[in-house]
Amino acid sequence: MNPKIAKLRTELEKNKGKISDLQGRNRDLEKQIRELEDTDIIGMVRENGMTMEQFAEMFRRMQNAPISTASEKEEPNYE
């Protein structure tokens, strides 16, 4: 077998291992971020004296409210 092929296959397997390790680390980082965001949200809810039920109701209302964008705002008519 061509020694270059063997060398390339070895490098390929090494890279696959690194990719797998990095993907696992990314999953861990995403989980940590999500947990910290959840903790922040709970802290804000408690800081404002809301119960979880009040927060859930507020969140439902926010989800049902139409989202306005900058293009939807009226521009002054200077004519």
Image: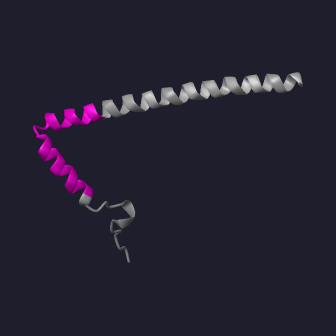
Q: Which residue is drawn at 39% across and 64% down?
A: 71
Asked whether 34 or 48 is in front, the reply is 34
Q: Which residue is drawn at 68% across and 23% down?
A: 14
Task: Tell me where residue 60 appears, x and y as whole percent.
Answer: 21, 54
Q: Which residue is drawn at 28% across and 62% down?
A: 66
Task: Tell me where residue 34 appears, x and y as whole percent.
Answer: 35, 34
Q: Is residue 5 left or right of residue 27?
A: right
Against 78, is 42 above or below?
above
Asked whether 5 or 70 is in front, the reply is 5
Task: Tell me where residue 54 appears, x and y as whole percent.
Answer: 12, 46
Q: Which residue is drawn at 49% across and 26% down?
A: 25
Q: In this view, does 1 lie to the left or right of 73?
A: right
Is 44 part of what is drawn in magenta?
A: yes
Q: Furthest residue to the bottom?
A: 79
Asked whether 23 or 56 is in front, the reply is 23
Q: Furthest residue to the front?
A: 1
> Total marks drawn?
0
Which residues fall within the magenta stretch?
Answer: 38-63
Against 31, is 53 above or below?
below
Q: In which quarter of the image is the N terminus?
A: top right
Asked whether 19 or 57 is in front, the reply is 19
Task: Tell me where residue 68 appears, x and y as whole percent.
Answer: 32, 61
Q: Is residue 8 left or right of residue 38?
A: right
